[in-house]
Amino acid sequence: MSIAPPAGPGDPPPGPDTALDDLLGLLDLEPIERDIFRGESRPTIVPRVFGGQVAAQALVAAGRTVPAERGAHSLHAYFLRMGDPGAPIVYTVDRIRDGMSFTTRRVVAVQHGRPIFHLSASFQTYEEGLDHQAPMPSAPDPDSLPTAAEALPSYARHFTDPATAERLLEARAAVDLRYANPPPYATVGEVREPRSQVWFRTAGKLDDDPLLHVCLATYVSDMTLLDSVLLAHGRGGWAVGDVMGASLDHAMWFHRPFRADEWLLYDQESPSAAGGRGLGQARIWTRDGRLAITVIQEGVIRALG
């Protein structure tokens, strides 16, 4: 896994030279035994492993046991326990099925002798078939939107800790993520439609390996999906200290080829929040209008104060 510097007009700024390299290093798991891999973690802005990291690493582990010509088409995962960002994670892959067209893998992530995450993933040999999709929603051009570095200082007054904006920028330095409308922490106390749009791409060019692009999209998919739940209640999230939240489960379907180093529109909405849980569902589109991914996630969301 490697990257080349972005080139050409409109490409994302490189930012810290090591940000994307560090992320790719996290995804480059160490093989320990047949079907057993070890991944490192890194400090996060909350005292647990970022869910997108463990999901992406688990998908890497699964993909390492599958023939390259079979691409990931779906994953279903449960977050079982909070991960320790100061300790490595061991991923054990179970080769559930190797069929003529489909391959299925189950992955268990373990820390300190206990499972923290469970993933089932399916891979398919490409084939032609029926083809239709919903129309892409309207959204502002990503190049017209402020970068995180440009937008975050104006939201800092809402944060409980003045250093939060800086930590957010550091945590997301590997990804160029731009909100089409203000994030929840920018409009605390204002009840809004439970819908959010974000454009994203990696902050640098990537190799052509399709599994790498799928894993990076998986990583990013956990960053903002539950924003729409917060918008419906005027809550700002962990950054302003008015909710406690954590991902419970996560599902993704990969419909069409895409590149994670090119603009992708993450169109997110929340149909329901009840029982201390909130549901987010989303579609991810390429800039030229192809439906690439569908995502659904439920998380614990408990109001504080």
Image (cartoon, rainbow, N blue to C red):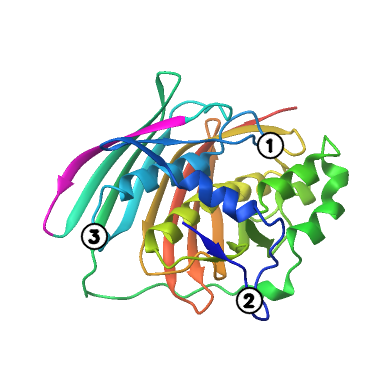
Q: Is residue 57 highlighted in magenta?
A: no
Label 1 vs label 3: CA separation?
36 Å
> Which of the marked residues, 1 or 2, is nearer the chain's N terminus?
2
Q: Amino acid at mark 2?
A: Ala
Q: Secondary structure at mark 3?
A: strand
Q: Is residue 194 left or right of residue 87?
A: right
Side of 304 where 204 appears, left or right: left
Which mark is drawn over residue 205?
Answer: none
SS for callout 2: loop
Find residue 37 and report its image quarter: top left
The quadrant holding residue 106 is: top left
Vertical order, 126 against 271 (above or below): below
Q: Which residue is mark 3?
A: 124
Residue 187: x %, y % from top left: 78, 50
User: Which comes before the other along the chain, label 3 or label 2?
Assistant: 2
Q: Which residue is mark 1?
A: 45
Residue at the spot x=74%, y=39% of the render?
Answer: 239
